[in-house]
Amino acid sequence: MILQSLIINLRWEIQLVIAALILIIHPLLLKIPYDTNDIWSTALMQTFIDAGNFNKYPVLPWFALALFGSVMAHGWLKIWNTDKRRNLWSLGIGTAALLIAIILRMARGYGNTFPFSDFGSYSFFFDQKYPPSLFFNLWFFGCSLVVISIIIAVNKFLPKLFLILDITGKVALFFYCMHIAILGVFSKRIGLFYHEGEVAATLIGVVIMMIVMVPLSKWFYKVKSQSKNFIIRMM
């Protein structure tokens, strides 16, 4: 977010090129060897490129995704002036990103981290987030846009169906910070930690989390709306 604030006023085409170049180069940067016992090389690599105990979210790949989001926001808010256009462009760009991700994955080399058995198998979708592989970033970006286009379409007929997204989306940074803290409390109390649960446990966790977070988000939005503090209003 800090880096993005420095270039947010650049043309969307320039932001798109910067994001694409970062994502293209990032898989090559991951091949740089470094000694994890050396605090300085570890701090440098895991701040910007790799992920590990020092930092799970390296700056470069996530900065690139943030720029993709900025480019899409330019389209949603300034170029595509109807829901139909927003929907069609989101669906088209999202589908293109998914196709590129599939082609990249099928090549079984550059931009992939883990191998897979067959196309469409569970292992095909199982790649790396910490740090994110190029396949993961493209797949995540494409899926996000396809889901957004579906939400836009469905919302025209059932506007109250996604009310929860409206409530939590108004305080996105607050939701993000709070849900991690609450998950930590639950993990500590229940004794169920990261990667120990499977799909059913994950879905149950999502439901419980939303039951807790929706009222909290609704409350904080009122606080945010009435506050004149810059940091609070940013959340």
Image (cartoon, rainbow, N blue to C red):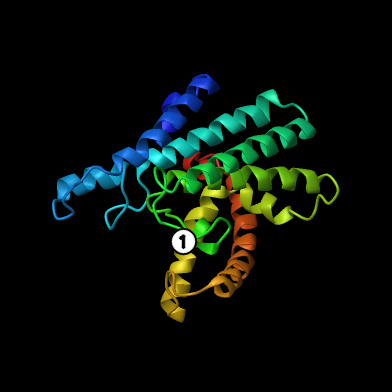
Position above or below: 78 against 62: above
The percent coordinates of residue 110 (x first, y second) are 39, 42
* Residue 1 at least partly seen: no
Q: What residue do we see at 42% from left, 73% from top?
A: 193
Q: What residue do we see at 65% from left, 56% from top?
A: 218
Position above or below: 13 against 174: above
Q: In the picture provided, is 124 more to the left or to the right than 91?
A: left
Please identify the residue farthest to the top as the structure is shown. 11
Q: What residue do we see at 28% from left, 47% from top?
A: 46
Tell which of 105 and 4 is nearer to you: 105
**Residue 49 found in image quarter:** top left
- Number of marks: 1
Q: In the picture provided, is 118 more to the left or to the right than 167?
A: left
The percent coordinates of residue 156 (x first, y second) are 83, 44
Q: Residues within 10 Å of mark 1 (few under 14, many from 20)?
A: few
The percent coordinates of residue 104 (x first, y second) are 49, 43
Q: Which residue is mark 1?
A: 180
Q: Quadrant of the N terminus?
A: top left
Tell which of 50 and 220 is nearer to you: 50
* Residue 231 at least partly seen: yes
Please identify the residue farthest to the left as the structure is shown. 38
The amino acid marked with disc number 1 is Ile
Q: In the picture provided, is 118 more to the left or to the right than 112?
A: right
At mark 1, the secondary structure is: helix
The percent coordinates of residue 28 (x first, y second) are 32, 38
Please identify the residue farthest to the bottom as the structure is shown. 190
